[in-house]
């Protein structure tokens, strides 16, 4: 018979002893001090130069109201707005401040004992308008009959409503007062008190008239 007890004993004697392994003692952990966080940009004090730059960038491109108003007022004070028109082949202009309206020519009623410069009177929606002959005042010949582009410029003058006929109305022009020059007189017959000066516009010489003296 096989002795199982002896066999087990021999197997046990053949096994090598297991060496005991000693684990190192755990090192006590030191408490970790959290690192100090770097200061944020908002908390970092900015140098004065950076603050000035930021203020400049914030204001750049913005209009300075006081400066703009002053510039607009100065520009408006130096500007003259005039109506340009053609009369006897010459280009003229008058200030638009007292112009009431521009109408087509209509039937003129002669006025007995009227001055030489008065053509007559017309009715404009019940308003009596005295038509003045500015051609004679400017030393031009009478207008040819049947001018299709002719217009009557109606103005307020000394509490009266006056009108004068021109051959053609052109446009309203804004110009700098400094652009108006004195009248270049070639001959004494060309001089008239009705002329304030001359200016260049669109390549043409335009004569600026004084309404007070033209219609006075």
Image (spheres, helix red, strand yellow):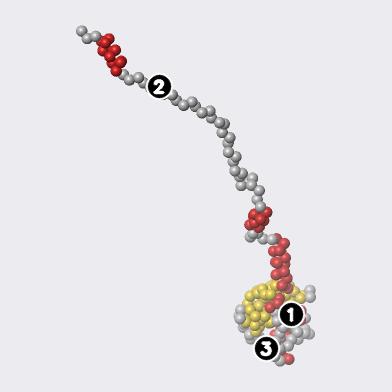
Q: CA distance from mark 3 to mark 1?
A: 20 Å
Q: Nearer the viewer, mark 3 or mark 1?
A: 1
Residue 49 sits above or below residue 72 on the image:
above
> For residue 141, which numbered disc appears in the image?
3
Asked where in the image residue 56 lies, by quadrant, the reply is bottom right
74 vs 45, nearest the viewer: 45
Q: Nearer the viewer, residue 128 or 24?
A: 24
Q: Which mark is residue 20?
A: 2
Q: Is residue 103 above or below residue 36?
A: below
Residue neighbourhood size for the residue with mark 3, other residues' Cα within 10 Å, grouped as few (<14), some (14–19), many (≥20): few
Q: Quadrant of the C terminus?
A: bottom right
Q: CA distance from mark 3 to mark 2?
A: 140 Å
Report x, y in % for residue 131: 72, 80
Q: What residue is drawn where x is 73% and y is 73%?
A: 98
Which callout, 3 or 2, points at the residue further toward the start of the chain?
Answer: 2
Give x and y (percent) for residue 104: 65, 76
SS assignment at label 1: loop
Q: Name the residue: 75% across, 74% down.
A: 156
Badge 2 marks a residue whose secondary structure is: loop
Residue at image location 22% in from the left, 9% down from the top: 2
Label count reads: 3
N-terminal-most mark, 3 or 1: 3
**Dot 3 and dot 2 residues touching (CB under 8 Å):** no
Nearer mark to the viewer, of 2 and 1: 2
Badge 2: residue crowd in 10 Å (few <14, some 14–19, many ≥20): few
* Residue identifier under label 1: 210
Q: Quadrant of residue 65?
A: bottom right
Which quadrant, please, contains the N terminus?
A: top left
């Amino acid at each position: 018979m096989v002795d199982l007890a002896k066999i087990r004993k021999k197997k046990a004697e053949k096994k090598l002893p297991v060496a005991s392994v000693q684990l190192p003692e755990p090192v006590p952990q030191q408490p970790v001090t959290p690192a100090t966080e770097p200061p944020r940009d908002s908390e970092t004090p900015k140098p004065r130069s950076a603050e000035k730059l930021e203020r400049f960038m914030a204001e750049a491109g913005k209009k300075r109201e006081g400066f703009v108003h002053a510039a607009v007022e100065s520009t408006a004070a130096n500007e003259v707005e005039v109506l340009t028109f053609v009369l006897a082949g010459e280009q003229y202009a008058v200030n638009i401040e007292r112009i009431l309206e521009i109408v087509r020519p209509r039937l003129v009623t002669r006025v007995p004992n009227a001055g030489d410069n008065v053509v007559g009177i017309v009715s404009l929606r019940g308003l009596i308008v005295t038509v003045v002959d500015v051609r004679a005042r400017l030393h031009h010949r009478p207008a040819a009959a049947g001018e299709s582009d002719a217009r009557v410029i109606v103005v307020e003058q000394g509490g009266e409503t006056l009108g004068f006929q021109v051959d053609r109305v052109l446009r309203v022009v804004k110009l700098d007062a400094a652009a108006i020059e004195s009248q270049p007189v070639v001959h004494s017959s060309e001089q008239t008190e009705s002329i304030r000066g001359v200016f260049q516009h669109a390549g043409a010489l335009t004569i600026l008239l004084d309404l007070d003296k033209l219609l006075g």
